Amino acid sequence: MGSKDAQQGVPRATVICIVLFMSSIILLVVVSPKFRFGGGVSDVYSGIGSASRVTVIAGEPEIFKPRDRQKAQSQDYVVGASSGPSVVPIDLMNMLGTQDYYGGISFDVLKCAAPIPTAFPKSTELEVDEVIKKFTNALLGELAGILKVDVKTLKPDMPVSMIFSPTAASITEAESRFANDPRSLAWADAISGVMSRFMVYRDESDVKTLLVCKDNKSKKAENTQALGTNWCPELTHAEIGQQLGFHAMPFISVGTLAHDAMKYGVCTKPPGMRGGYGQWLKKERMFKKEWATFDTHSADIDHVVFLFDVLYEKLKIFTKQYWLGVITMQNPFDMFSIADIIYTVKPDLMIEAGTANGGSAVLWGSIFELSGLYNSKIVTIDINEPSWTPGEKHWGGQAREDPRTKPFWQKYVTFIKGSSTELHVQEKIREMAKGARRVLVLLDSNHASDHVRNEMEALCPLVTVGSYCIVEDTKMSRWSADGPLSSVFTFMEKHPEFEVDRSRELLYTHHVSGYIRRIK
């Protein structure tokens, strides 16, 4: 017959489960403020919500969806709010680490100066040390002026972040305070001003300054003794920074900064990154409508996906993505899209600009095999031949196996050494494309906008109707000072025979607006 509860249609086990579930919810939402969907998150992060390095993301937990969406948006559900039942603050410095917060996850270089031994090959070690000492003392003098302290109290081997915040309990706390200290911007300007006296390059037989004065001329540095000269006294530190850019790590010790710049050379970041890459990212790329690059229906979703992308690059996940023992450096979301394009378009010829270590060509060859495209071919182009040495560390990851030994490489792939923008390479490609009924193009080489623009004009027209010219890694334009995205827009304005197919972008794509389909 069963129990009384069972006879009444409510099993005892069900009652127990409901009670346990409700108890868990009560404990989660009421007792523990850390896990509240509402103000608890803001309580936990109170004190940093307005910090310049904190990015605030507003989200809407589905379980507590408000009935009046419009009213909620006008109050708490606004990106950038510092509190509210759905606000989640993200600390960019903690996420990126101090070095990447200032230096960035992209190689955005404005100017590079030669190390002293390169600029002056006959210089002695003693002369180089004298230059480093002169550089260090000049920086210390500027730092003392900014902090209004006696220069004798400053230690060249102490991190500048600790000098700014001597009461900080840890280096992490000091770096956090430094990022939000307005004096750090004056220090960034001062570093640029002092560096300009030492930043030189070798022009044939002469050594010249990178700094150009108001007379539009660089100055000639006769010897190492001339370094440290104020070449353009009419220029302020701020004006020099706009011309030469800014040091990527202003928080390190003065001694280290001077030593490394003179011994190994130094490259600067663009003027927009004066306050650090993280601040530039938040101000210029995170929230501006024109940079909402991902194909989503919500600004909040775009921000979350963008932060994921930044983290993906920070952690260098692309160096850990293997296919048949070879690094492919292909985002899995896009890998599925391109695999489906191969299956549906069924190209006779795939043209890949940018071979790298050959992993992607092996991947596409295996998709050819699985799709039954046994007579199709892949031609892949690079200025460097794909190489593999056991245990060799590569910028794209740790090599495991040689891609050229793979059956799919040997069956489907032809390698051409050279640049995709070189005429003799383009002539070979056009000749191969003549007999193909269906041509698919992937552009994944140099991602600088000028290069991609030339590459698109040369190779995209080879694409057949219904197929694609896929411009890869257009996402880079959002988190770097340059990238391929502008080239896509320029190309599309001139080529009505193509359209951007955003249906191929599966939320997290590396090729935003990069799947370009030929329609006529």
Image: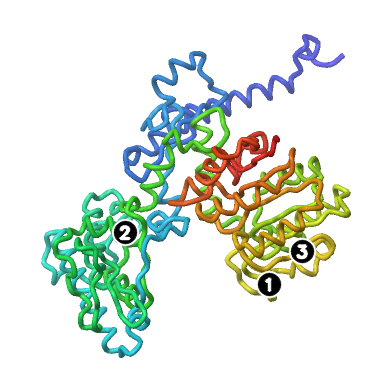
**Dot 2: within a 10 Å radius of its alpha carbon, few (fewer than 14), some, or many (20 or more) residues?**
many
Q: Residue at x 80, y 69 (%)?
A: 405
Q: Position of residue 222 (x, y in %)?
A: 24, 82
Look at mark 3 in the image and give the residue it sits on. Answer: 414
Q: Which mark is residue 111?
A: none
Marker count (numbered): 3
Q: Residue at x 61, y 48 (%)?
A: 471
Inspect this view and state whether residue 166 appears.
no
Q: Is residue 351 above or below residue 338?
A: below
Closer-to-camera residue (360/494) = 494
State the quadrant of the C terminus.
top right
* Of pointers 1 and 3, the one earlier in the residue sequence: 1
Q: Earlier in the sequence, mark 2 or mark 1?
A: 2
Front residue (pair 121, 275): 121
Q: Position of 278 compared to 471: left or right?
A: left
- For discs 1 and 3, the disc positioned in front in the rendered view: 3
Q: Which residue in the protein does label 2 denote? A: 245
Q: Amino acid at mark 2?
A: Gly
Q: In this view of the protein, can residue 133 be seen by the observer?
A: yes
From the viewer's perspective, is 133 left or right of 62? left
Judge the density around disc 1: few (<14), some (14-19), many (≥20) Cα neighbours within 10 Å: some
Judged by depth in the image, the label closer to the viewer, 3 or 2, is 3
The foreground one among 257 and 483 is 483
* Residue under pointer 1: 387
Q: Is residue 100 left or right of residue 163?
A: right
Q: Which quarter of the picture shows residue 395?
A: bottom right
**Split into 4 quadrants, where in the image is the N terminus?**
top right
Residue type at mark 3 is Thr
Q: Secondary structure at mark 3?
A: strand
Location of residue 228 in the rendering, given as x and y in whole percent from the top left corner: 20, 75
